[in-house]
Image: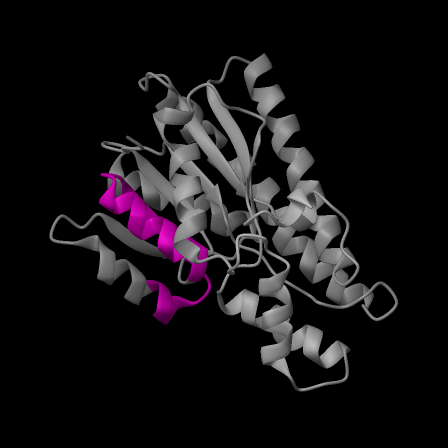
Amino acid sequence: MNRLDGKVALISGAARGIGAATARLMVEAGARVAIGDVLDERGHQTARAIAGAEGAAIYLHLDVTAEEEWRRAVAATIAQFGRLDILVNNAGLFLGKDIEGASLEEWQRLAAVNLTGVFLGTKLALPALREAARTSPAGSAIVNLASVAGLVGSQLDPLYSLTKGGVTLFTKSAALEFARKGYRIRVNSIHPGVIETDMGEQTFLTRARNAGTNDVAAMRERARAAHPIGRLGQPLDIAKGIVFLASDDAAFMTGAGLVVDGGLTAQ
């Protein structure tokens, strides 16, 4: 189940964290993967670690806020692997400032990555995904990384929540548009809870700072306690959900949001 044999994926922000775990799991499931990121050294390392003898992974420099870089990344993926079946819009930023504390420039950077990056990736990968869908029984797939902060309000991260809420509804709208046009491209989102990644660590540091303390461990424990399942998430927890949504096992899912949050939003 959840096999991706013969499929080709492009994953943004995949040098580390959830993106890297997803790339690794996709290769294990039979896919060939293009890893896009701005962290060139880390990205090359990740690609080399999972490529194997068959060269199943490559690294591409990709600033998701730049239209021309998306064009090059899609073209390079097709030049290397011959097609594009799966797009994972994973790249994202976390700000950790409240409405009064954030500057316009900080908001614009956050929106450029978390919103514009998803729009550009979807728009510029669309022709290749539509073409690949013609020869795939279940069509092509887009998976957008949203968040539980895109489902419920956030006391501490309102601007991050604003961007992820946008991703949530863009996912549904894109799914409806592509279905109406007969493109056979499924579009779904995934909504992680707090995950133990570099970004997750950044949230602990930010919340400790905002609380006027250096006790990062206390902030981590507070986050853990908020998850009824009793632990924080791991990148592989989310990668498994992404692979499912990208696979033919999710052939009847589009415009949906898969919540993988340890029970956080069930409360």
Q: Nearer the viewer, residue 36 or 144?
A: 144
Q: Which residues are magenta?
A: 17-43
Q: Indicate whether 29 appears above or below 232.
A: above
- In the picture provided, is 30 more to the left or to the right than 216? left
Residue 242 appearing in the image: yes
Task: Provide residue 117's location: percent of width, then percent of height.
Answer: 59, 48
Q: Residue at x 49, y 38 (%)?
A: 143
Q: Residue at x 44, y 41 (%)?
A: 241
Please say whether residue 27 is one of the residues in the magenta stretch: yes
Q: Quadrant of the N terminus?
A: top left
Figure check: 90 above or below 179: below
User: Where's residue 135, x and y in %?
Assistant: 31, 18
Q: Is residue 207 left or right of residue 129?
A: right
Along the horizontal axis of the image, is 197 left or right of 77?
right
Number of on-image labels: 0
To which quarter of the image does residue 157 belong? bottom right
Residue 7's x, y, as percent?
29, 33
Q: Quadrant of residue 14?
A: bottom left
- The image position of residue 190, as x and y in percent, is 54, 41
Asked if residue 214 lies left or right of residue 62, the reply is right
Asked if residue 60 is positioned above or below residue 175 in the image, the reply reads: below
